[in-house]
Every structure is written in C-alpha cells, then in structure tokens.
Image (cartoon, helix red, strand yellow):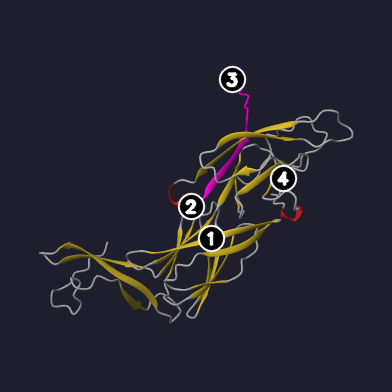
C-alpha cells in the first residue's frame, strides 16, 4: 500500500474542495505518448488532525454482467484497443474523452459501434446476433462519488436449461423468422422412444430478450410450442406441458412435462431475471 502525506502548506486544500480532481499522468511503461487520467477523491478521517484518505479511480469502468466472457473493442481520439472481460469483472478505461464501443459474446457477431459520452446517463441498447437469434444487451450508466462513469452491461433474461433436452425458444411462435434456437450437439429423432439423453450437452445459460416479456418453448422440432409464459411474474413456480407432433409411423405421442421458475439473478447480476426450465418429475434410483 502507498501512503500519501500532505503538508498543511500544500497548495491544495482538501478541507475546502469536496469534488473529485482530474489528474493527467504519462505512463512510463507505455509505448504511447497519450496521457492517462485518474480521478483523485478524498474522504476526511479527522478534521482536527487534518487527515484525509486519498483514492485514485479511472474515468470509465465497464462491468460485464453477462454469464459469459465479453469481447470489447474501444476506439477513441487517443487510443484504440480490444480486450476480453470475464463474467462479473470490469474493464478500466483511462481516458476522459468520449469513445466508440462495440461488443460481442461467444459465437456471436460484433455489435454496431455506439458512442459513449462522458457523464451522459442515457440508457444504451446494443444488438448482437448469435446463431439464429437476436439478443439485446443494455448499458446502465452510473457516476460514482469518486467521479468514475461506470457502465453496467447486462441482458434482461437468462434461460437455464436443466432438462437435458434441446429446447427452442421464441417470443412469437407465429413468426418463424423469430425462432431462436441453440445449436444442440445431439438431435432428437421422431421415432426415438427414449427421449431423455444423459449425454446431451448445451450451454448452461442462454441469453434472451423480448420486448413483450413473453416466452414460448418447444422440444427440438418434434413438439408443438408451449403456452405463453409471462416473464414478469417474479417468484413464479409452475409447470406446463408440450405435446409431441404426430408422425406417420407412430401411434402414440409423448407429452413433455416441464417445470419453470422465474427469479432475479443474485448479487451484482440483479438486473437480470433467470428463467429455469427443468423436468416436472425426477425419478431417483437409490438402490
């Protein structure tokens, strides 16, 4: 830890100035001549002894509130660079001028550039395309007491698939172009009697966005769409069924009994709702 001491004859009087101060520094280890900026803020420890706690913070901070790593590309007047931010972690931007930002997640295309204006707290929406779906990511802006402009990037919903089934999901089953389908490693066959595959693998959490807060589910291409699920019902714990389609070479149809719950994500991810889909019944053999 570094201890910063200030003599009472210093030109800066911290007891009078309560606002963060923007400092310009030139990093010695950097090959670029562009200066870095920090906000210097302070809190009073003791008025009588003239003791203050000084802290340095970055002008910008991007926090990844997605369940996956985030690719980031930043273009500004002084710099241009790209980086990867892991889930729940942040990226510090050491320049005080406005910049252009674009992002992507695993297996997705880059979003369009959006302009980030210093201290402008207007919500921003970024659109990315992953497989056959379009996902809307949101940027929530907050200016902290230390002067840092923090950007929280999140998605409205995560779908947690606990069924080991290849689930398809959409907000409007009538418009087939809005079908949002993950790419399962193992397809279901119409004439398969054993539909519960323990070897089936799929991303644990899927990003989902819908303007009308509605969701329809189906099992692969072999079932009908479910009834509409309302995602605004926080604390919802219910069940639903989806019926298998008719096939010429089969007499019976399977009815998939599934359970669903809607809850807020924990801790710093609280802006997101998690929709968990699981089998309604689970048979456990303890013999």
Q: In whole angstroms, how far apart are the C-alphas of marks 3 and 4?
A: 30 Å
**Residue at the extreme top of the image, as rendered:** 287
Q: In whole angstroms, how far apart are the C-alphas of marks 3 and 1?
A: 46 Å
Mark toward the start of the polypeptide (3 vs 2): 2
Q: In whole angstroms, how far apart are the C-alphas of marks 3 and 2?
A: 40 Å
Query: Residue, x 40% and y 74% (percent of image)?
Result: 29
Which dot marks residue 138? 1
Determine contact: label 3, label 2, CB under 8 Å: no
Determine contact: label 2, label 1, CB under 8 Å: yes
Query: Residue, x 67% and y 44% (percent of image)?
Result: 216
Name the dominant secondary structure of the magenta segment: loop
Q: Which residue is mark 4?
A: 185
Query: Residue, x 72% and y 52% (percent of image)?
Result: 179
As rendered, which of 6 and 195 lies closer to the eye?
Answer: 195
Determine contact: label 3, label 4, CB under 8 Å: no
The 10 Å Cα crowd at callout 2, few under 14, some 14 to 19, many 20 or more, is some
Magenta highlight on residue 285: yes
Please count the marks in the image: 4
Horizontal relation, residue 148 to residue 100: left or right:
left
Which dot marks residue 271? 2
Marks 2 and 4: which is nearer the front? 2
Q: In whole angstroms, how far apart are the C-alphas of marks 2 and 1?
A: 10 Å
Determine contact: label 4, label 1, CB under 8 Å: no
Per the image, label 1 sits on a secondary structure element best described as: strand
Horizontal relation, residue 281 to residue 83: left or right:
right
Magenta highlight on residue 98: no
Q: Which residue is mark 3?
A: 286
Q: What range is drawn magenta here?
A: 270-287
In the image, residue 208 sits, relative to residue 220, either above or below, namely below
- The image position of residue 167, as x and y in percent, is 69, 43
């Amino acid at each position: 830890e570094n201890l910063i001491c200030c003599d009472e004859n210093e030109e800066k009087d911290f007891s009078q100035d309560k606002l963060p101060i923007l400092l310009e520094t030139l990093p010695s280890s950097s090959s670029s001549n562009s200066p870095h900026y920090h906000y210097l803020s302070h809190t009073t420890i003791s008025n009588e002894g003239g003791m203050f706690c000084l802290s340095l913070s970055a002008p910008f901070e991007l926090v990844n509130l997605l369940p996956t790593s985030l690719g980031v590309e930043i273009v500004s007047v002084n710099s241009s660079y790209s980086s990867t931010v892991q889930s729940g972690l942040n990226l510090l931007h050491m320049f005080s001028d406005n910049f252009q930002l674009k992002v992507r997640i695993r297996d997705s295309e880059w979003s369009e550039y959006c302009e980030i204006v210093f201290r402008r707290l207007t919500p921003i929406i970024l659109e990315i395309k992953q497989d056959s779906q379009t996902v809307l990511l949101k940027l929530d802006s907050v200016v902290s007491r230390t002067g840092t402009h923090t950007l929280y990037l999140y998605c409205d919903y995560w779908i947690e698939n606990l069924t080991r089934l290849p689930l398809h999901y959409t907000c409007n089953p009538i418009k087939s172009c809005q079908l949002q389908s993950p790419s399962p490693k193992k397809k279901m066959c119409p004439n398969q009697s054993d539909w519960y595959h323990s070897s089936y693998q799929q991303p644990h959490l899927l990003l989902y966005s819908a303007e009308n807060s509605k969701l329809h589910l189906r099992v692969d291409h072999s079932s009908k769409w479910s009834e509409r699920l309302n995602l605004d019902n926080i604390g919802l714990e219910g069940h639903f069924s989806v019926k298998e389609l008719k096939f010429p070479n089969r007499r019976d149809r399977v009815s998939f009994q599934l359970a669903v719950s809607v809850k807020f994500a924990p801790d710093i991810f609280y802006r997101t709702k998690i929709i968990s889909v699981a089998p309604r019944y689970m048979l456990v053999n303890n013999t």
